[in-house]
Image (spheres, rainbow, N blue to C red):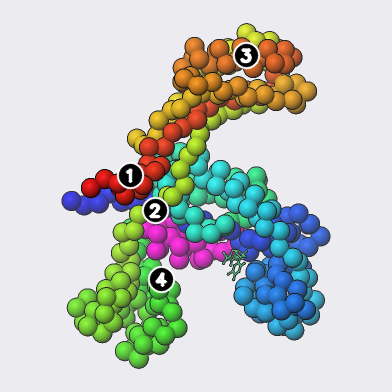
Amino acid sequence: MKQAQRKIIHIDADCFYAAVEIRDNPKLKGLPIAVGGSATRRGVIATASYEARKFGVRSAMASATALKRCPNLILIPGRMSVYHEASRQMRDIFTDYTDLIEPLSLDEAFLDVSHCKQCKGSATLIAQQIRQRIAATVGITVSAGIAPNKFIAKIASDWNKPNGQYVVTPEQINAFMADLPVRHIWGVGKVTAARLEKQGIKTCADVRNFDIFQFVQLFGQFGEHIHKLAHGIDNRPVVSEWRRKSVSVENTYEQDLPDLRSCIEQLPALLESLQKRMARLDDDYRIQNCFIKMKFHDFSQTTVERQNTSAVLADLTMLCDEAWQRGRIPVRLLGIGVKLHDLTEGSGQLELFTC
Ligand code: TTP
């Protein structure tokens, strides 16, 4: 049976740590900066701004070498907790489009948007929107590759870096792959590239001159892997290890909701948005209970959560009443949500005990 065409987006932030530092200290903009350990303590560079890269400063280089190449380099110690927060904000945006998210590192992830309904289902437009939202919310730029599989999407995200995106449609795969140097194939390092070159193989088009049996003879099982990827074939799914704990929606009102009745009047609209989000969950989730969040005019905030409640109007109304009684002043924000039980959790352990 023919597999349905997948739509994969690979998102990769541009000089991630350095971009976060520039965001938090705009005076650094346009200057050669790097995040890394001190040269006097044999530190290494984690990443460098594009201005520093012009001098040959690279990730994993000794900071002492980097300073030799670029004497005006501004070396900044890393702030991991800030990078983690930026990463979390990015992921929050991804989850608005799909739950099939496979993070590769703090600043990089695959998204399978094959079933995403936003932007009329166009992966190109979804990527554009995600990039705009990250720029507006996180304050850094990211690049994206859009393709029918992970392998090509990852290569494509580098094509228009920084702050750009590149699309490879199914029809364009052949042409896109032909000129691609074999070193771009995942798993092909310097040694394999040299071995391939000995056989006169420099590009994916050269690989395609061989049939798969010849290739397996020459390079063993790895040859099959190279041969498939050189044809742009990669059926690896996006594996999302991350599972949701809750789903929620909220709204900040232009004008405060003055009393309990006006809060209750907002519940049906919120419930409708929540149900839309819940419809995107897979079958392995069960609702544990329901909660409501209320932020009052004076910015104080309360959350009410009760066991055995569900995403139905009657339960929400009861929770809303309870939340309101805690403040009894106008409300600026109202949110509702459900806590989830994940049936896949602990399934590995079960297998250990079942014969
Ligand atoms: P990368 O995505 O490899 O690179 P980058 O985001 O800095 O730049 P580019 O625009 O070329 O993608 O790495 C992401 C972050 O991971 C990077 O900002 C710093 C960190 N990192 C290290 O700490 N050590 C390393 O050797 C590398 C490669 C990255």
Q: Earlier in the sequence, mark 4 or mark 3?
A: 4
Residue that carries the numbered disc 4 in the rendered image: 186
CA–CA distance between discs 4 and 1? Answer: 35 Å
Q: Earlier in the sequence, mark 4 or mark 2?
A: 4
Three-letter residue code for mark 2: Val
Q: Are marks 4 and 3 in contact (CB under 8 Å)?
A: no
Residue 15 vertical placement versus 335 (above, below) = below
Residue type pointed to by label 1: Leu
Q: Quadrant of residue 287 in the image?
A: top left
Please name the residue that numbered disc 2 is placed on: 238
Residue range of the region highlighted in magenta in the rendering: 144-168
Residue 44 on the magenta span: no
Q: Would you say the residues marked 2 and 1 are in contact, meaning their CB atoms lie under 8 Å apart?
A: no
Q: Is residue 352 left or right of residue 104?
A: left
- Residue 281 visible? The answer is no
- Where is mark 3, residue-wise? 322
Q: Percent from the top left, x then y, of residue 204?
A: 35, 76
Up/down of 266 relative to 138, above or below? above
